[in-house]
């Protein structure tokens, strides 16, 4: 069988498709007689835009529409005109939507006239390979472009088998995609390692795939959805990705000079925290929450092979959370390897300074620690299992270990109040030297999240997010099964409290590049050099128990606990003296207060600031 695997826009153009890499390896292992080819249409779309616009629409515009506007559906909208054979489809709705949100859409509008011709060219290139089956992987805003190409392919080759899979096909989404688009023959819902080869065996034999768990297929004119399975793919059965065809496509692409390519690897699936405490707002992992991880030795072997083969040192892990065993059996191997790797990792925000130090020693340069908030009560509403004080410690330790930290400050949780945010907002100017969030964002209702599955948590009303009105020409009851994001009544803070939070975060972001709060131990005293935006330059000098107190508070302590530690260290401040000193240090912005807990804010060493931060 000739199998052609396709990843459509808006897959990131600096990354290979892990899904295609895994499927390619899977088919070579399970069906060595098949011919497997790939089509990296994300790269082709960026090339096409460059060509058709005479360079006016570049890869940066691709990112702005395909990634930055993901919660507004701009990328899907660009291709909806091609899907529905109407270049003006949804344009008026998009403009109304954008005007209400002050959302720039000119770039997306400029791209759309090229979409139909691009789909036609893609069909030419795919069919030139003579495939028996075309498999699409769809995640985030890949649905509409994939559907547009699938429709075009089937109109030209009705005998061609079209299969969809990916996270956009989880659960009811996959069945809705199937039954509303008859040119899609099969939809694989859930993990593909077992289901896809089973489907191909049925196609070889010409039998109905009634026993393939989760599969959607056509029984005459009836869309059938097989029951999904709770069985998850064992780590031993998850292949190492094959990126050879991606590398060839990238090397031949005129887009190559615009991007800094990275490798993508997968060490684990599921979420060990979510198995115990599913964060209330999180819809990731769909029906496969069970945590499974490859042994660290195997993960390192895969990375070592890929780095040697592709000569790329940036490695992005797609794990939703790091396997804690990797601090014993993976990261030490990386640190001892001698490779000058630049790892990108998602972690939990309660890592210790020693663990963050090991991440840095192993070449980790970027982490996503899921901080979400600096207020303990709001974190409790999320079921995050950490405190605001611990999250501030994580931000500080990221500075100490040269780790770029990406995070969002989320709000809008049922049960939160303005009083939960007031003490945090008041202290944000003291944190201006630490890495700020991307912004303050109201949460959206995500399918598969506890907020979605349990209306009793506070979101009793839900409807497909408004952006889908300019993306799909489908009735709302079908959208309710097809889409991932939903609108509901606003919860939590609104009005002045919401604006104060957003303004404070904006000021943090604006002042960060010019801010420092640095420790220096000169052998006699502990100095703190304060060069934070919004404060007059100052240097504070601490000796004796006061220096000891500031160091002890790096771990976060209550005043009674701090007093016990200082006493054990041989210091003799009275409780009154200590409380007065803590009050003074807090007033200077040297401490963060989370309820009764105080955390030291100065960092060690000069932090690195990227030039773009200063803009």
Image (cartoon, rainbow, N blue to C red):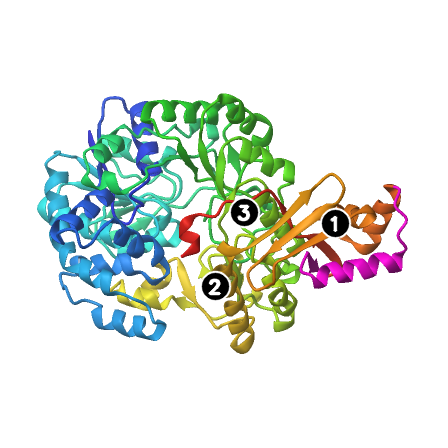
In the picture, which quadrant includes the C terminus?
bottom left
Count neighbours of disc 1 (C-alpha within 10 A) and say few if under 14, some if 14 to 19, many if 20 or more. Answer: many
Q: Earlier in the sequence, mark 2 or mark 1?
A: 2
On screen, residue 317 versus residue 262, left or right, reads right
> Which corner quadrant of the image does residue 350 belong to?
top right
Q: Is disc 1 in contact with disc 3, using a CB cutoff of under 8 Å?
A: no
Position in image of residue 296 (x %, y %): 52, 26
User: What residue is pinned by disc 3?
Assistant: 369
Q: Which residues are magenta?
A: 570-594
Residue under the point 62% across and 42% down: 351
Q: Earlier in the sequence, mark 1 or mark 3?
A: 3
Q: Using the image, determine if residue 159 lies above or below residue 494.
A: above
> Would you say residue 572 sits in the magenta stretch?
yes
Nearer to us in this view, 124 or 394: 394
User: For residue 441, which numbered disc appears in the image?
Assistant: 2
State whether residue 334 is above or below residue 532. Answer: above
Under circle 3, the secondary element is loop
Front residue of 381/23: it is 381
Residue 343 in the image: x percent, y percent? 46, 35
Q: Nearer the viewer, mark 2 or mark 1?
A: 1
- Determine the secondary structure under disc 2: strand
Residue 301 image position (x, y, % from top left): 44, 22
Distance Cα–Cα, label 3 vs label 2 = 17 Å
Residue 386 on the magenta span? no
Q: Is residue 128 visible?
A: yes
Mark 1, secondary structure of its residue: helix
| The N terminus - image quarter | top left
Rendered image: mark on residue 550:
1
Question: Nearest the camera: 30 or 198?
Answer: 30
**Which residue is depicted at the point 90% across and 48% down?**
572
């Amino acid at each position: 069988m000739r199998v052609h695997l396709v990843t459509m826009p808006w897959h990131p153009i600096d990354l290979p498709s892990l899904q295609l890499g895994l499927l390619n390896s899977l088919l070579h292992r399970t069906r060595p007689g098949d011919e497997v080819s790939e089509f990296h249409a994300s790269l082709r779309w960026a090339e096409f835009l460059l060509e058709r616009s005479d360079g006016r629409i570049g890869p940066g515009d691709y990112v702005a529409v395909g990634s930055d506007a993901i919660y507004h559906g701009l990328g899907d909208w660009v291709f909806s005109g091609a899907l529905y054979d109407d270049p003006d489809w949804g344009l008026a709705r998009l403009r109304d939507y954008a005007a209400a949100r002050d959302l720039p859409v000119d770039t997306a509008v400029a791209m759309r006239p090229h979409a139909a011709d691009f789909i036609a060219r893609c069909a030419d290139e795919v069919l030139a390979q003579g495939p028996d089956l075309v498999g699409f992987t769809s995640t985030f805003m890949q649905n509409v472009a994939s559907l547009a190409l699938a429709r075009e392919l089937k109109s030209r080759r009705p005998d061609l088998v079209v299969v969809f899979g990916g996270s956009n096909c989880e659960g009811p989404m996959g069945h809705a995609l199937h039954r509303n688009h008859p040119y899609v023959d099969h939809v694989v819902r859930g993990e593909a390692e077992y289901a896809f080869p089973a489907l191909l065996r049925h196609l070889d034999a010409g039998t109905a795939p009634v026993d393939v768990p989760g599969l959607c297929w056509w029984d005459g004119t009836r869309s059938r959805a097989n029951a999904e399975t709770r069985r998850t793919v064992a780590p031993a059965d998850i292949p190492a990705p094959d990126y050879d065809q991606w590398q060839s496509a990238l090397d031949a692409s005129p887009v190559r000079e615009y991007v800094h390519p990275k490798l993508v690897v997968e060490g684990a699936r599921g979420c060990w925290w979510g198995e115990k405490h599913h964060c209330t707002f999180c819809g990731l992992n769909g029906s496969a929450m069970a945590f499974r991880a490859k042994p660290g030795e195997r993960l390192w072997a895969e990375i070592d092979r890929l780095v040697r083969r592709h000569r790329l040192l940036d490695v992005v892990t797609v794990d939703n959370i790091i396997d804690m065993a990797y601090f014993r059996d993976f990261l030490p191997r990386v640190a001892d390897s001698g490779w000058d790797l630049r790892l990108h990792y998602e972690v939990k925000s309660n890592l210790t300074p020693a663990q963050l130090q090991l991440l840095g020693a192993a070449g980790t340069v970027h982490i996503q620690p899921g901080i979400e908030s600096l207020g303990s009560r709001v974190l409790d509403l999320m079921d995050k299992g950490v405190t605001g004080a611990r999250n501030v410690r994580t931000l500080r330790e990221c500075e100490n270990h040269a780790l770029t930290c990406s995070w969002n400050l989320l709000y809008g949780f049922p049960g939160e109040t303005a009083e939960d945010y007031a003490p945090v907002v008041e202290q944000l100017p003291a944190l201006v030297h630490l890495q700020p969030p991307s912004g303050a964002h109201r949460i959206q209702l995500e399918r598969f999240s506890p907020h979605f599955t349990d209306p009793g948590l506070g979101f009793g009303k839900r409807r497909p997010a408004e952006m889908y009105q300019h993306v799909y020409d489908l009735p709302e009851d079908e959208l309710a099964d097809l889409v991932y994001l939903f609108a509901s009544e606003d919860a939590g803070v609104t009005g002045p409290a919401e604006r104060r939070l957003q303004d404070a975060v904006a000021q943090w972001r604006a002042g960060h590049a010019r801010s420092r709060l640095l420790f220096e131990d000169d052998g006699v005293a502990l100095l703190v050099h304060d060069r934070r935006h919004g404060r007059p330059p100052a240097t504070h000098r601490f000796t004796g128990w006061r220096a000891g107190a500031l160091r002890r508070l790096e771990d976060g302590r209550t005043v009674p606990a701090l007093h016990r530690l200082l006493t054990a260290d041989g210091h003799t401040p009275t409780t009154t003296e200590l409380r007065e000193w803590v009050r003074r240090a807090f007033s200077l912005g040297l401490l963060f207060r989370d309820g009764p807990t105080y955390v030291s804010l100065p960092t060690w060493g000069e932090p690195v600031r990227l030039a773009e931060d200063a803009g």
